[in-house]
Each structure stands twice: as C-alpha cells, then as structure tokens.
Image: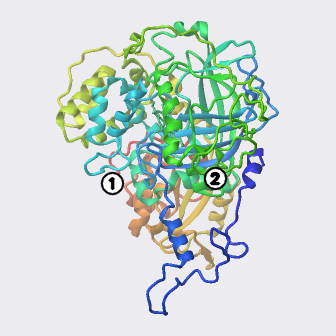
Amino acid sequence: MTSKDRQIATSRRPFGEGALTTDQGIPVDDTANSLRAGARGPTLLEDFHLREKLMRFDHERIPERVVHARGAGAHGYFQVYEPLDEYTTADFLTDPDTRTPVFVRFSTVQGSRGSTDTPRDVRGFAVKFYTRQGNFDLVGNNMPVFFIQDGIKFPDLVHALKPEPHNEIPQAASAHDAFWDFVTLQPETMHHVIWLMSDRALPRSYRMMQGFGVHTFRLVNGHGHGTFVKFHWKPTLGTHSLVFDEAQLISGRDPDYNRRDLWEAIEAGEYPSWELGLQLIPQERVFELDDIDILDPTKLIPEEVVPVTPVGRLTLDRNPDNFFAETEQAAFCVGNIVPGIDFTDDPLLQARLFSYLDTQLTRLGGPNFTQLPINRPLTPVRNQQQDGLHQDVVPTGRANYHPSSRGGTMQVGPGFVTYPEPVDGPKERKRSETFAEHYWQATLFWNSMAPWEQEHIIAAYRFELGKVGEMTIRVRAVEHLNRIDHDLAVSVARGIGVEEPVKSIDNHGRSSPALSQEQHDGAGSPRTRRVAVLVADGADARVIALLRDACTEVGTSVDLLAATDGTVTTSDGVPMEVTRAMSTTSSVLYDAVVVPSAAADLSADGVAVHFAAEAYKHGKPVGAFGRGLDVLQRAQIPLTTATTDPALIVEEEFTPDFPHTLLTAVSAHRNFDRDVTGIPA
Ligand code: HDE
C-alpha cells in the first residue's frame, strides 16, 4: 500500500452500509415510491427525496475530455534503480529506496467516452507521480512524435480528426476526408501519420505498448546544470499489436477490450510494468544531432544515435475503486513539474502548458479540482488561493494575502527554480528554419520496418485513403508518400485508384532498427496470453488437462469452448465443463486457438471452422491434432506449410511436445510472415 493509497482511503465511502439517507443525512423510509396524493394520484412537489434523487441523477455527467475522452486508469508505484543526482535534483529520481505512488491513465484520442478501445489511433500514456516535492505529470503518448510543431494548430488538427461537424460521423476514425485534407495540406504531419498507419496504432494491450514524453524536457542538477532529456516507457511484456481487421472486429465483439485486459491483469496479480528509459543529451551536444532540432516534436532522436538508458520501473498494482471518482476526475497537467525537471521552448509543449490547466476548469467545474482525492498531492498544500466552486477545505485565520504580519507565516523558498535560460529575440510569428524539413524521418521509419510491417502500413493507407471521397485529397496524399518512399507511394496509389507517381526523390537509405516492433518481440512472454481450446463430445480429458496445466504453469489462461454452454462428454463418458459457448465469443479475443481430437465432428460446425480460419488469418498460433486437423482443413489452412510456420502446430496425435511448441509460438505473439491472402475468414 502506497502513501497515496492511504490518503485515498480516507475518502472512501462504501456502498451499502448503514441507514439509507438523503444527501442531508436524513434517513429515508421508502426509496421505491414517490410521495403521491393517493396511490393512483399525482406526485407531490414536496417530495424532497424524489427531487434530490432526480436532481443528482440529472447532473451525473461532466464534460468529457475534448481529446483522450476514453480511457482506463490504474494505481501503482515508480522506483528509480540508481540515484540520478548527476542530472537532477528531482527527489523521485534520486532515491532508490522510495516507491513513489503513481496513477496512470491510458486513452484513445479521437473517440468519445463511450467509443471503442481498438480504433486505429494514438494512445495516451499519462502518468501522475505523487512525489515528496509535489505532483509531477508526464503526459505522454504511445508514439514518440506528434502531428504538428506548434500548439496553435492543435484545434485545427483535432477538428479535422474528430467526427465531421455536420453529422458527427465517423466516430473514432481518421479514415475520412477532413483528416486527410488537413494532413495533406500540413506536411509536418507526415511523420506522425506514418506511425498512425503502422501497427503501433493498434496495441494488443495497454500493457504491451511503449510510452513517450515526446517533447525534449530538461533535467537540472544541484549545481544548476541542465541536461536535455527524452522520456521513454518500455513495457516488460514487449511491444505487440493487433492487426487492423482483428481490431475492427474487436470493436464489435468487445469494445472494452483494452480496459478489460488491464483490469483483469491487475485483478489476477499480473501487474504490468514498464521500464523508464532516458535519452540524455548534454546541452553542448545539441547541435551535433544531424538534422534534428530537439525543440521540434515531429522528430525523434534515433536510439542508435542517443541510447535509451534504463533508470527505473513503473508497476501498476491496484485498480481504481471507482471509475468516475478516479479515472474520470484525474486531471493531468503538463505544467505539473517538480524541482530538478524543467520545460524547453518546444512550441507544442509551450502551448500545452496553457491548455491542460485551462481545460480542467470546464471539465471539472472550477479551480478546486486539485482537492479531489485523485489529484490531491501527498505534500501539504499551503497558499493564499481561496474560494471558487466546490471549495472542500475550510481555511482558518485572516491572513489570506502575502506578505502579512497577521499570521500565515508561510516561507517562500527554497522551491522550484526555473532554469535560467537566456532568451532574446524579436516578437514574431515565425517558425525556425530548423523545423522546415518534414519527410526524412518518415522515410527513416519506413526503412526501419520489417516487410510485414511495411505491408500493414500500405494496407492501412489504402484503407484510410480508400474511404476518402475527394480524389484530389487522395492524389495529394500520394504526392507526399512519393517524397517519403517511391515504392510506398506506388503501392498505395495502386490500391486507391490514383495514377502511379513518377519517382522524384531517392530514399536516403537510413534506418533505425529500434523502431521496428520485430525488435521488441524478443521480450515476448506467454504470461497473461489467452488460448481458446475448441472441444466437442469425445474429447480426451487427459490430453486437455495436460495442455491446460502446461499453459497455467506459465501464466497463460485456457478457455474451453464448445458449440453450446454447459458440458461436453469426454472419451471416458464423463461430463467436462466448458468455459462458454463458441458463439458467445470470438477468435479475436484470444491469442491462440487449439483444436484437439474429439469423437464428434467439429469440422461440420461453421462457427468452429471460422474460429480457426480467423485466428490463422490474423497470424496467431493455431494448433490441432487428430480429428482436430479436419477443422483446419475445412478452414482451408494449408497444413503443409507447418514445416516452415512456427505458429502452425499440427500433429497426427497429441505429443508431450505440443504444449511447449504452442507456448513458444504464443510468446512470439504472431507469425506475421504467414501468407494469408487466400484464407476466406
Ligand atoms: Fe494533449 N490534451 N494536447 N497531448 N493529451 C489533453 O487535457 C493538448 C499533446 C495527452 O488521461 C487535454 O485534460 C494541446 C501531445 C494525453 O487525462 C487538453 C496539445 C501529447 C491526454 C490537451 C496537445 C498529448 C491529453 C484534454 C498541443 C503527447 C490525456 C483533456 C499543443 C505528448 C490525459 C485534458 C488524461 C489530454 C491539449 C498535444 C497527450 C485539451 C493543446 C503532444 C495523454 O488539455
């Protein structure tokens, strides 16, 4: 239990204990019948209980976040490995014995609060550290760059991205004219757009995605010396994604897919964790970073140029007690910064410093939102700020000003000291020349992708642009792609009815291997993965038990799915309970599918056949033995490719090696090199 947990505990009020009362504490004798003039007569205005109950209900909603409206949060802690005094005085980064409590909220960007978890979208990764020097909020995303260079364009970007103004369509989707119109007229977006077209926009789990602070920040040590820094979160479970078709299907089958996954993992004690990594750039080296202005948030610094140093670990170990009170009311503010960390002049960051505090006023109804349990710092708050809607404390005394000789002797300093960076310049609305190039890092990203990642990117551009009605916008998009990579532009053009462009620029050929998700799969683990086993009458209970035991031993869960809920009869004639009926779930909610042998012919069941075909189509491990092979054959899965496909595990009969081979494939996530063009799922 962290100190933040203990603080929040003082605000808990369990449902269902003691006498039912009104908000005024008056005991209620009946909460099911309003006060009427006779049993069949009209309701009386004096019914204060009815009025209060409806008034409270009528006002339950608060404005949703204008972006990042849909999210999920969790509590946890952060611990630094070694003191980082050389770089910073921030307490939580210099004391390895301290577990700093955190609250983390993950989110999608485009959709409204009730939208789905799995659109093609950027994900938010916002961390509130309750440090001993006050709250530090690292409000990041799961992609290291941003669409625009200057915050003044943010309203335009978001208007273009969100549903169109006349009919509020489409929900949680960038595949529409407005978005592509805007980005193709604003070439600085091209780098982030290619990230958005990649599988990074479809995380398999919040627990399996990276996080980035995006902007360059500054660490400041005890001597006042500054070091530029970029923040990285690397998930212990590796970085893994869904495929787009699967993500779209999940949107219907389980719109809460990512938030359920986070919740269930924490409930099961499978605490997700991330390593905090820092890219540290001595101030003197800034101009050695070829072609990169560290103030430009549309550029990343390749890890091969400045390595990411692991410095600590974030662990999430407690689900919120109440979604609204905690996750919805959490107010992240980029301006919440502690001594030892400071901002830079990145113009996107500078605009954010205004926006977050501002938006909370509307969203949380006034300036006292810092008093809400989830936002309250652990450190004492002492100042002369006062009044406003929802003041939750009772300030005492008369010295509500500073300085004062009438009590209220709060000392000012030592405290946060702004890094004394000299600034000088004419007032002008102008962008630095060093921000002018917009394509080379998009090319770097493209060059760094594995062939399957490139295929997914091409398919994504084709899908998105294929939904764009205005041909001129499609043509403009292809022109931009031609400046990123000619072959990419040609492949996309062919899919969307646009004339192939003429090659105009040579690809620079540079790459950054760390950008490929293939590099992250090494960290794969079978823990918390989900395997579906399709069973029918005549299944061999012994074999299924062996399979299940091998899986649970390494933290992989197994669901037994049958044609109907209830039981199937095993080959020994004994009833075996199934987890649920196949028809109530879907292959897209599992990481792998196994079809064991059974007496009953599952290959005649279209649901089972589709289950296997769909899993195969999505690159998942698919295993079968004995009569289970018939299902794979009906699904048109080319069994002969099993010799070269490590995720297609087919055997004449079950062997003791089967679970091991399956779990190795599950750890590797998917086989995206599989040719699935002919599979009819
Ligand atoms: Fe945000 N952003 N943003 N953003 N952002 C908000 O604040 C904004 C940007 C990010 O879980 C809003 O409380 C501007 C970059 C996350 O509660 C708002 C600009 C990055 C979250 C806002 C940006 C982010 C937000 C909406 C350009 C990644 C969700 C509700 C200058 C580094 C936090 C709210 C949570 C939320 C403004 C750009 C991440 C309106 C003006 C870049 C993770 O204040």
Q: As rendered, which of 153 and 518 lies closer to the eye? A: 153
Q: Look at discs 1 and 2 and give the one toward the viewer.
A: 2
Residue at 49%, 58% in the rendered image: 61
What color scheme is it? Answer: rainbow
Q: Horizontal and vertical percent for residue 236? A: 64, 38
Q: Image quarter for residue 135?
A: top right
Which residue sits furthest right?
Answer: 97
Q: Is residue 651 visible?
A: no
* Quadrant in the picture for the C terminus: bottom left
Q: Nearer the viewer, residue 24 or 611?
A: 24
Q: Secondary structure at mark 2?
A: helix
- The residue beneath circle 2 is 265
Q: Is residue 566 left or right of residue 481?
A: right
Quadrant of res 407: top right
Q: Against 595, is 119 above or below? A: above
Q: Is mark 1 within 8 Å of ligand 1?
A: no
Depth check: 655 or 376 in front?
376
Residue 94 in view in this figure: yes
The quadrant in which residue 156 appears is top left
Tag 1's secondary structure?
Answer: loop
Q: Which residue is mark 1?
A: 680
With 657 as the anchor, is 169 left or right in this view?
left
Residue 199 on image: x %, y %: 44, 38
Q: Amino acid at mark 2?
A: Ala
